Amino acid sequence: MYWLFKEDPESYSFAQLEKDRKTAWEGVHNNLALKHLRQVKKGDTIFYYETGDTKSVVGIMKASDDAYSKEKGDLLSSKEIAVDVVPVKKLKNPVSLQEIKANPKFKDFLLVRISRLSVMPVTDDQWKEILKLSEQT
């Protein structure tokens, strides 16, 4: 499955993830984003989207394990969810939110529809289109 995770690069950038080689993705509080995060499985591929001034998809990560609860209790009732991620690669060119919004193929993309959501699924077609856009100069 494909996902998109958002982060402010001043808090934790894709470059920092490449240096660290692994991190726990945590600190998600929105209920819908938590619902999505709970569904992440080992091997899922994830776009890294930088918020702030960048507002672009800049890299690809992979879930190195299933989502897990950081507190006692089960995954479904926990509000402290994490997923361990590792970097795969930096995109050749960042794909900006402006490019995504201008492309009719993304009219139903949650990044466009619910822009504040920090964890969201990405369809196969959306994934392929972002990769295609990242290859353009």
Image (tube, rainbow, N blue to C red):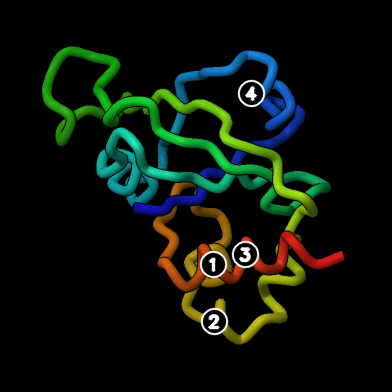
Q: Is residue 43 left or right of residue 73?
A: right
Mark with earlier residue (2, 4) = 4
Mark with earlier residue (4, 1) = 4
The correct choice, above or below, for 47 with respect to 130 in the image is above
Distance from disc 1 to disc 2, alpha carbons, whole Å, reads 15 Å
Q: Is residue 89 left or right of residue 121?
A: right
Q: Position of residue 76 (x, y in %)?
A: 15, 36
Distance from disc 3 to disc 4, alpha carbons, whole Å, reads 21 Å
What SS does tag 1 mark? Answer: helix
Count the numbered circles shown.
4
Q: Nearer the viewer, residue 101 or 73?
A: 101
The circle drawn on residue 130 is 3
Q: Label 2 belongs to which residue?
A: 107
What SS does tag 2 mark? Answer: loop
Quarter of the image where one finds residue 65 = top left
Mark with earlier residue (3, 2) = 2
Crowd rating for badge 3 (residues with CA inside 10 Å; few <14, some 14–19, many 20+): some
Q: Is residue 122 left or right of residue 19?
A: left
The residue lying at 56 percent from left, 82 percent from top is: 105
Q: Nearer the viewer, residue 88 or 12?
A: 88
Q: Are marks 2 and 4 in contact (CB under 8 Å)?
A: no
Distance from disc 1 to disc 3, alpha carbons, whole Å, reads 6 Å
Q: Label 1 belongs to which residue?
A: 128
